[in-house]
Image (tube, helix red, strand yellow):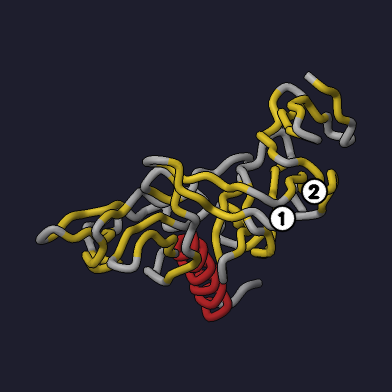
Amino acid sequence: MWKPSCLLCAFLLSAFLCAIAAEKTGAELTAFESKGKWGYKDTRGRIVIPARYEVAQPFLPEGIAAVADQSGWAYIDAQGREVIRPFIFDNGPDYFHEGLARFVAQGRFGFFDRHGKVAIPARFDFALPFAEGLAAFCAGCKEVSEGEHKAMRGGRWGFMDRQGEVVIPAKFEEARGFEKGRARVKLGGRWGFVDPSGAFKPA
């Protein structure tokens, strides 16, 4: 038979584990505004993360939230600790495609998941979002301005899988994302399509 002291220990352990689980998810936190800044409160209205951000998006189910501070956009955890700084796309944090979003470190592109964990280390000169399990990347390309927009020019393009392994070598002059089993690419000055095996077919 369990003794009262043992039951108390079991209860405290259970409560501790539940607290840890809640702490990690951030699911109970909602954004609030104070004097032009944003922070997060719990369901009881208690301030968990002080109002210090310019923008505060809702927490993802996985336990991170995108916020903007004076240094730009970042993902934080439920304790307000910075997890990762995403690539900025369309004036905000890069969108998640197939569970992965881009980040930049020392001028190189990589991918992180919805937990904020690096899934593919930053080792590519540039990369497009994932589509149908593959992402186009370029080697040796440079960012150039084209009017109000910017584009990547030069170098060669290939495709990687979700583990960051190169599955189609970088041999194309340009590349787009996969759609319906093929991706538009340019090879030898001619536009065509490539399938997941790497086979090229002129348009």
Spot occupied by residue 16 in the image (x, y as percentages of width and height): 49, 71
Q: Dividing the image into 4 quarters, which one contains the N terminus? A: bottom right
- Please name the residue shown 78% across and 26% down the image: 193
Badge 2: how crowded within 10 Å, few (<14), some, or many (20+)? many
At label 2, which amino acid type do we have? Ala
At label 1, which amino acid type do we have? Ala
Which residue is label 1 attached to? 139
Q: Is residue 18 left or right of residue 80?
A: right
Q: In this view, does 3 lie above or below 51?
A: below
Q: Which mark is residue 179?
A: none
Q: In this view, does 160 lie above or below 105?
A: above
Spot occupied by residue 177 in the image (x, y as percentages of width and height): 67, 34
Which residue is label 2 attached to? 170
Distance between the Cα atoms at labels 1 and 2? 7 Å
Q: Residue furthest left?
A: 35
Q: Is residue 49 left or right of residue 97?
A: left
Q: Which residue lies furthest to the top in this view?
A: 203
Query: Does the CB distance between marks 1 and 2 fall below 8 Å?
Result: yes
Badge 1: how crowded within 10 Å, few (<14), some, or many (20+)? some
Q: In this view, does 174 lie above or below 25?
A: above
- Among the two numbered marks 1 and 2 on one chain, the one whose residue lies closer to the N terminus: 1
Residue at disc 1, secondary structure:
strand
Q: Which of 61 and 110 is in front in this view?
A: 110
- Please name the residue shown 51% across and 62% down the image: 21
Spot occupied by residue 42 in the image (x, y as percentages of width and height): 30, 58
Q: Which of 117 and 158 is in front in this view?
A: 158
Residue at disc 2, secondary structure:
strand
- Please name the residue shown 27% across and 53% down the image: 31
